[in-house]
Image (spheres, rainbow, N blue to C red):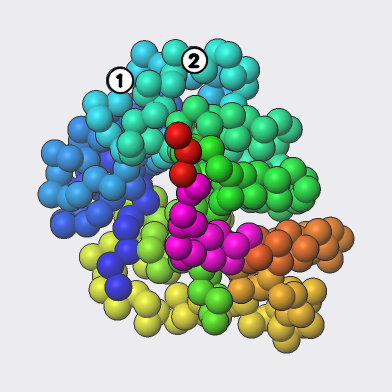
């Protein structure tokens, strides 16, 4: 397994990594170009710069050059959309994506508008449940909307990766799947997720020992952590939407079971989308 490494902007750390695929994390949009340049100058491949900004999107400066770097821009809110007009040419770049919390006020409406303007977007999900009906409306727009628009994650990924006979994991769309992304601190210690990194739960002290990490006991335990939900007879264990959720909303499912109906509708909409794309086009009537 060769996971991509999410790491801070640290030239000293880059020197310790050789031939790795890097997602470089910064906290300020003004640091994107510099971080991209330093990563590219190292013996590594730059996947993207992940800017985890504490400021809403409308408070960031569109004059900060990105130097053509792929960017994943995580913000708590979009702010006033009219103030984003100077951003649009940059946000429409092929390798740029804006992420906002699904539970944030007005974020779902804002994402729909941004996607309609050609900006690729993504949603993040925390412990706070999102408003399920507006989320379902956005999901239907993302997957069935007849008007062209930019992709919205995780729906775009699920539409491509959904397996009716298995499970589909959307965590990779937010850099949270250890099979695809591992997280490093400035000292090179390796955590399986961003949450583990913040909690200082490390599985390796040396990034040079990454080979075979999928056999590490902590990695194997994390891969099978979902089984605890079934042993405890948690609501997730009897939910038909498990195949596209894998417990993403487990923390709130007992007090807010709306996730079950949403995930069931999500699977139905994905099936509708696939059926529509597989059906041959009907012949159009002749018109003078």
Q: Are marks 2 and 1 in contact (CB under 8 Å)?
A: no
State whether residue 251 is above or below residue 85: below
Residue drawn at (79%, 74%) of the image: 235
- Please, is residue 173 above or below residue 220 in the view? above
Quarter containing the C terminus: top left
Label 2: element kind: helix
Spatial CA span between label 2 and label 1: 16 Å
Can residue 55 be seen from the camera position used here?
A: no
Magenta-tinted stretch: 269-285
The residue shown at (13%, 39%) is 41
Q: Residue at x 63, y 60 (%)?
A: 269
Q: Which mark is residue 183?
A: none
Q: Nearer the viewer, residue 284 or 1?
A: 284
Q: Which residue is mark 1?
A: 65
- Left or right of 49? Residue 54 is right
Compared with 217, 173 (above or below) is above
Where is residue 250 drawn, in percent x and y? 72, 66
Query: Is disc 1 placed on a helix, strand or loop?
Result: loop
- Compare residues 178 and 264 and report the one nearer the observer: 264
Mark 2 or mark 1: name the one nearer the start of the chain: 1
Image coordinates of residue 71 in percent, x first then y, are: 36, 36
Q: Position of residue 119 (x, y in %)?
A: 46, 32
């Amino acid at each position: 397994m060769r996971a991509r490494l999410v790491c801070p902007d640290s030239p000293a750390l880059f020197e310790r990594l050789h031939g790795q695929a890097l997602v470089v994390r910064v906290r300020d949009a003004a640091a994107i170009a510099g971080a991209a340049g330093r990563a590219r100058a190292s013996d590594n491949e730059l996947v993207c710069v992940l800017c985890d900004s504490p400021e809403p999107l409308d408070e960031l400066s569109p004059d900060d050059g990105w130097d053509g770097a792929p960017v994943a821009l995580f913000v708590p809110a979009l702010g006033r959309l009219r103030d984003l007009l100077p951003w649009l040419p940059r946000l429409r770049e092929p390798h740029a994506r804006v992420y906002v919390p699904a539970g944030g006020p007005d974020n779902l409406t804002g994402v729909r508008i941004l996607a309609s303007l050609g900006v690729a977007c993504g949603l993040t999900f925390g412990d706070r449940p999102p408003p399920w009906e507006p989320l379902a409306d956005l999901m239907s727009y993302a997957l069935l909307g007849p008007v062209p628009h930019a992709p919205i994650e995780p729906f775009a990924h699920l539409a491509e990766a959904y397996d009716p006979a298995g499970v589909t994991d959307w965590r990779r769309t937010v850099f949270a799947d250890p099979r695809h992304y591992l997280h490093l601190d400035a000292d090179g210690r390796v955590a399986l997720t961003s949450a583990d990194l913040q909690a200082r739960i490390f599985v390796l002290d040396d990034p040079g020992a990454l080979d075979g990490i999928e056999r590490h006991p902590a990695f194997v335990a994390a891969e099978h952590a979902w089984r605890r939900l079934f042993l405890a007879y948690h609501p997730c264990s009897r939910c038909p939407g498990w195949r596209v959720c894998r417990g993403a909303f487990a923390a709130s499912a007992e007090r807010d079971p709306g996730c079950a109906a949403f995930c069931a509708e999500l699977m139905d909409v994905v099936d509708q989308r696939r059926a529509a794309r597989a059906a041959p086009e009907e012949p159009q009537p002749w018109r003078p």
